[in-house]
Image: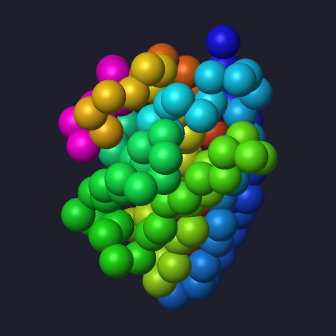
Amino acid sequence: QVQLVESGGGLVQAGGSLRLSCAASGRTFNSSAMGWFRQAPRKEREFVAVIGWSGGNTYYADSVKGRFTISRDNAKNTVYLQMSSLKPEDTAVYYCAAKLPAYYVGSYYNYLLYNYWGQGTQVTVSS
């Protein structure tokens, strides 16, 4: 029903910024909660941020709160993750994910709750 493709990853110095994009195909995008997760080598996949279908409800992991901003443009079927003040600890493969349908966005912290996943984009932050 939904196909997700991430882009925007790359190499950035500590303190720098990147904006990740996730393009979604499928007309159910507007009814979804969209999340960003990340996974570093030898670590579990962890929650980063989630946004509701309207864009009004956003939630962040404590580790990125104040530095990352999630947003979505339903007209473009795209969700974004603006990352600022990047740290080496942010280095990971970043995945976007969609949950359909979405009712309680504030509860969607677990990757097992999501229905669709992109293939990921690498973010590397150098010290």
Q: Which is more toward the observer, 119 or 116?
A: 116
The residue sitting at 59% across, 53% down in the picture is 72
Q: Position of residue 87 (x, y in %)?
A: 44, 76
Q: How many marks?
A: 0
| Image quarter hosting the N terminus | top right
Magenta region: 106-113
Q: Is residue 102 left or right of residue 121?
A: left
Q: Residue at x 57, y 68 (%)?
A: 82
Q: Is residue 100 left or right of residue 96?
A: left
Q: Does residue 4 appear in this view?
A: yes
Query: Which quadrant would residue 20 be assigned to in this image?
Result: bottom right
Whether 87 is drawn above or below 120: the answer is below
**What kind of secondary structure does the magenta stretch mostly adopt?**
helix
Q: Is residue 114 shown above or below 46? A: above
Horizontal and vertical percent position of residue 98: 51, 29
Name the colour scheme.
Answer: rainbow
Q: Quadrant of residue 10?
A: bottom right
- Can you say whether 29 is above or below 59 in the image? above
| Residue at the bottom extreme, as displayed | 15
Q: Which of 28 and 111 lies nearest the eye of the viewer?
A: 28
Q: Looking at the image, which residue is at 47% across and 20% down? A: 100
Camera-nearest residue between 77 and 41: 77
| 41, 66: nearer the viewer | 66
Quarter of the view holding residue 44: top left
* Residue 126 shows up from this direction: no
Q: Position of residue 43 (x, y in %)?
A: 34, 41
Residue drawn at point x = 45 percent, y = 25 percent: 99
Q: Is residue 56 magenta?
A: no
Residue 112 shown in magenta: yes
Q: Where residue 71 sits: x, y (%)?
A: 54, 59
